Image (cartoon, rainbow, N blue to C red):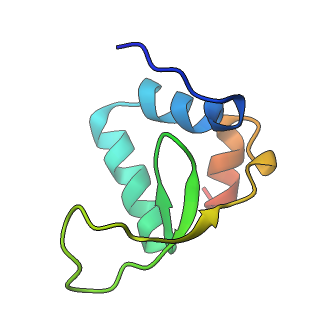
Amino acid sequence: DIKVHPRVEFPFALLSFTGSGPFNRSMRLFARRAGFSLSDHGICEASHARGMGRGRRLWTGPPIAQQKFLEEKDIFHFLGL
């Protein structure tokens, strides 16, 4: 696959497309438990109320200021990993 992302999304795209499936799922789950929604486009604050079905939008606000995320390690640091 070829995907084009804006520069500010590069760390998230790199994290997503270079990690294995289990790694990506565990990262998204960790972010979710911390109150965020993580994707290949960015990270947003999220509401993960019980009973919400799959496919529903969970984010509650704009992406976290992405100038904080210049490299993959900035995502890990943000999540406390």
Residue 1 pos. (x, y %): 34, 14
Q: Residue furthest top?
A: 2
* 74 lies above or below 8: below
Q: Residue at x 72, y 46 (%)?
A: 74
Query: Closer to the camera, 48 or 27?
Result: 48
Tell whether 6 sits left or right of 24.
right
* 25 lies above or below 72: below
* 55 lies above or below 53: above
Q: Residue at x 70, y 29 (%)?
A: 7
Tell whether 50 sits left or right of 6.
left
Residue 19 pos. (x, y %): 42, 30
Tell whether 65 sits left or right of 52.
right
Residue 6 pos. (x, y %): 65, 30
Q: Residue at x 44, y 62 (%)?
A: 30
> Where the C terminus falls, by quadrant?
bottom right
Quarter of image, res 55:
bottom left
Residue 67 pos. (x, y %): 81, 47
